[in-house]
Amino acid sequence: MMTYENFRDAIKDALKAAGGPLTWTEVRTNAKLPQTFPNNQWVHRLEKDIGLDRGKDKQGVIHWQLR
C-alpha cells in the first residue's frame, strides 16, 4: 500500500520533470502509480502541501500543474 508521502513525492517529481501541465493519466504513467483514479482526499492535501493546481480546458480535461 502506498503512503501519502510516497504519492506526494511521486506527483511532485512527475510534474516538475514535465515542466508543464499534465493530465492524471500522464501523471500516473510518468510517476508509475498503480491507481486508476487518485484519492480525492490526498489530492486536496496536495493542493495545500505542494501547491497542486488543477484546471479544466475547453474540452473539460483536467490538467495538473504546480503553482
Image (cartoon, grey):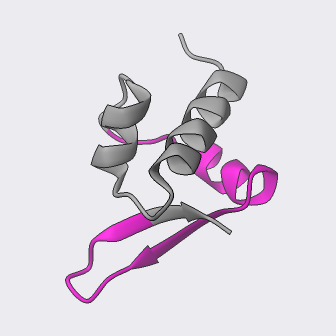
The front one of 63 and 2 is: 63
Of all residues shown, which one is farthest toward the right? 49
- Spot occupied by residue 36 in the image (x, y as percentages of width and height): 29, 35
* Residue 40 seen: no
Q: Where does residue 64 sit, x and y in percent of width and height?
A: 47, 61
Residue farthest toward the left in the current orientation of the protein: 59
Quadrant where the C terminus is found in the figure = bottom right
Up-down relation of residue 55 to residue 22 (above or below):
below
Find the magenta span and give its range.
37-63
- Image coords of residue 55 (percent x, y): 46, 76
Relative placement, left or right, of 39 versus 9 is: left
Q: Is residue 32 visible?
A: yes
**Residue at position x 31%, y 34% from top?**
29
* Residue 48 belongs to magenta span: yes
| Left or right placement of residue 67 versus residue 60 in this view | right
State whether residue 28 is above or below residue 58. Answer: above
Against 50, residue 53 (above or below) is: below
Give percent across and percent down for residue 19.
51, 57
Question: Quadrant of the rendered structure where residue 31 is?
Answer: top left
Of all residues, the one furthest to the bottom in this rendering is: 58
Q: Residue at x 38, y 24 (%)?
A: 32
> So how many labels did they put on this image?
0
**Relative horizontal placement of residue 1, taking residue 31 as reference (left or right):** right
Is 1 or 29 nearer to us in this picture? Answer: 29
Please state which of residues 30 and 25 is positioned toward the viewer in this rendering.
30
Residue in the image at 53% along x and 49% along y: 15
Query: What residue lies at 44% left-to-right and 42% top-to-bottom?
Result: 38
Left or right for 58, reference 49: left
